[in-house]
Image (cartoon, rainbow, N blue to C red):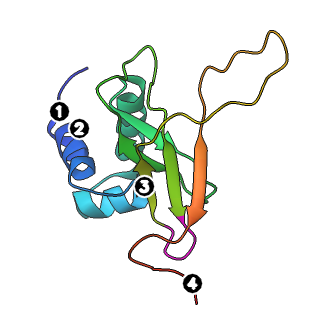
C-alpha cells in the first residue's frame, strides 16, 4: 500500500484518539479541506490492508479504530469488546479475554465476532 500524506494524517488522527471515530469526526480532525469521498476510499483501503477496523456498535454511523499488529490484509484478528456509551455515544475498543462461546450446531464455524457492551463511560458516570 502506498504511503500518502493523507493516509499518514488519517492514521495519526486515529493514533491520537482514545476512542473510535466516525467518518465525520475524522473529517473534522483532518481539516476543512477533507473530501468525503477521498476519506471514505482511504478508510476502505486501510481496512483492506488490516490497518484499521470498522465498528458497527448499533449507532447510525460506523466508527473506525486502529487494528493491533496481529491483523493483516488476509484476516482481521482484533477479537475484543466494543463499549458504547448510551449517554454520550462514544465507542471504545476494550481489550478483554474472548468470551465463552455457546455450543453451535455441528458444522458451524465462527470466523469473526463482534461483541458490544452498552452502558455509561467513565466521563458520563453512573446514572442517577
Residue sitting nearer the eye, 125 or 74: 125
Q: Is residue 43 above or below residue 70?
A: below
Sequence-wise first label, 1 or 3: 1
> 46 or 111, which is in the foreground?
111
Of labels 3 and 4, earlier in sequence is 3
Labels 2 & 3 near each other (Cβ < 8 A): no
Contact? badges 2 and 1 (CB < 8 Å): yes
User: Disc 3 designates what residue?
Assistant: 92
SS class of the residue under badge 3? strand
Q: Is residue 41 above or below residue 84?
A: above
The residues tagged by marks 1 and 3 sit, at their Cα atoms, a distance apart of: 27 Å
Can you tell which quarter of the image residue 61 is in? bottom right
Between circles 2 and 4, the one closer to the viewer is: 4
Q: CA distance from mark 2 to mark 4?
A: 39 Å
Q: Which residue is mark 2?
A: 7
Q: CA distance from mark 3 to mark 4?
A: 19 Å
**Residue sticking out furthest to the left:** 5
Q: Is residue 19 magenta?
A: no
Give the magenta-colored segment's residue range.
Answer: 85-89
Quadrant into which the N terminus falls? top left
Please, what is the dominant secondary structure of the magenta stretch?
Answer: loop
* Circle 4 residue: 127
Amino acid at each position: 500500500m502506498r504511503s500518502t500524506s493523507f493516509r499518514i494524517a488519517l492514521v495519526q488522527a486515529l493514533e491520537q484518539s482514545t476512542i473510535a471515530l466516525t467518518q465525520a469526526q475524522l473529517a473534522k480532525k483532518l481539516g476543512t479541506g477533507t473530501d468525503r469521498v477521498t476519506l471514505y476510499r482511504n478508510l476502505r483501503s486501510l481496512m483492506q490492508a488490516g490497518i484499521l477496523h470498522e465498528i458497527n456498535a448499533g449507532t447510525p454511523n460506523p466508527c473506525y479504530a486502529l487494528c493491533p499488529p496481529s491483523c493483516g490484509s488476509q484476516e482481521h484478528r482484533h477479537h475484543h469488546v466494543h463499549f458504547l456509551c448510551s449517554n454520550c455515544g462514544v465507542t471504545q475498543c476494550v481489550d478483554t479475554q474472548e468470551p465463552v462461546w455457546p455450543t453451535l450446531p455441528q458444522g458451524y464455524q465462527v470466523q469473526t465476532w463482534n461483541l458490544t457492551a452498552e452502558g455509561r463511560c467513565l466521563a458520563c458516570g453512573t446514572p442517577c
